Image (cartoon, helix red, strand yellow):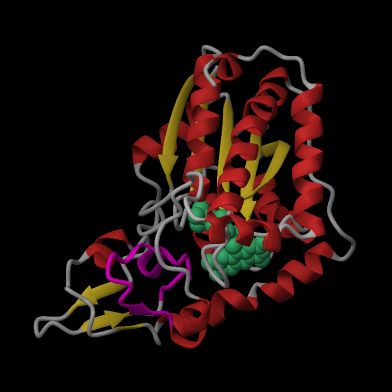
Amino acid sequence: MKIAIFYFSGTGNTRRIAERFAETMRQRDNEVELLSIDGLTLEKKLPDSVWQTAVNCDLLGIGYPVYAFNAPPIVLSFAKKLPHLLKNKRAFLFNCSGEPLKLNNISSIKLCGILKRRRLNVTNEYHYCMPYNIMFRHSDEMALKMWQTARQLIPLDAEEILQGQKHLLERVGCGAAIAWAMRCEQWGGQLNGRMYSVSKDCVKCGKCVNDCPTHNIRITKNGKFRFGGKCLMCMRCAHLCPQNAIRIGMFNSWKVNGPYTFKQPKTEEERQRYNKMLTKAYERYFAEAEQRINATTVEPAAKRSE
Ligand SMILES: Cc1cc2nc3c(=O)[nH]c(=O)nc-3n(C[C@H](O)[C@H](O)[C@H](O)COP(=O)(O)O)c2cc1C
């Protein structure tokens, strides 16, 4: 089967998940093309090669991080640019978020509507808990546990998709109205994006300029930083800045700088932070995942490669 997986990832968590899906599906003898959405929405039309990939694949996947109980605008804009001629092709969605809240399941409502109009039939949808890139930093142990859980769940979910077993996430009542109201975050983000600034620690390495998925950051001739009005609040610039030199406007106290290592923490203090963070909701998420992993006796290729 020809599978095309498109994903957007602000700070790398969704990318990890997308890569795991691709790896697992390839191990089951499928032809998988993995494409980042970064840069694909800057032009009016999708590049011909991407258009062809979407038209020619048998199964299409889209992955994204949840932003204010919605899919990021770049993902919606990508979906709107997909061809209308997808002839009831099957599609699967996956997303990740910092909280294991059921409310996050409403994030795909608008996206599903757009895909339906493109004749895409969303039959499978999966959510994974991954560490926060805004608001607060998850402990290293918690981040590792989240990733290990997702890593083990993905082969099972991929198997379901490939076997043609439908799996959709349960949504809360009034989900469409809540998601619609929460989309004000997108305008707020654009407004706040203009308030970004750099501190004197900046060494003008240009990483943020090159990394920004909407090309929203530039350095003027006299060395000043300019942040435009296209910010997605994806946090890539601030999270990955090696100097921790970017201030994220009104939300600066929520900044989380430095990538997660997804390794076992070294200090006792870090280990203790895990226990503090393990609230009932996370406990339930991990327990349900563990139950599913233990109950599945499949011998998928990806499990063999663990
Ligand atoms: C602007 C913004 C809004 C977010 N909104 C939510 C949310 O509504 N619910 C949630 O659980 N996590 C939320 N998060 C957390 C991200 O979904 C989470 O950190 C995710 O793992 C980031 O994935 P990425 O590394 O692929 O960008 C939000 C993050 C950002 C930057």
Image vertical order of residue 196 relative to residue 107, above or below: below
Residue 285 locus on image (x, y percent): 77, 47
Res 149 → quadrant? top right
Of the pair 176 and 160, the residue shown nearer to us? 160
Quarter that holds the C terminus? top right
Image vertical order of residue 5 relative to residue 284, above or below: above
Quarter that holds the N terminus? top right
Residue 223 appears in the rendering = yes
Residue 259 locus on image (x, y percent): 41, 57
| Count of marks placed on residues | 0
Q: In this rendering, would 258 be left or right of 224?
A: right
Q: In this rendering, would 286 be left or right of 23?
A: right
> Which quadrant of the frame does ligand 1 lie within?
bottom right
Magenta residues, start to end: 230-248
Residue 301 locus on image (x, y percent): 57, 14
Of the pair 242 and 37, the residue shown nearer to us? 242
Of the pair 179 and 87, the residue shown nearer to us? 179
Of the pair 55 and 66, the residue shown nearer to us? 66
At a point 61% along the width and 52% down the height, the residue shown is 142
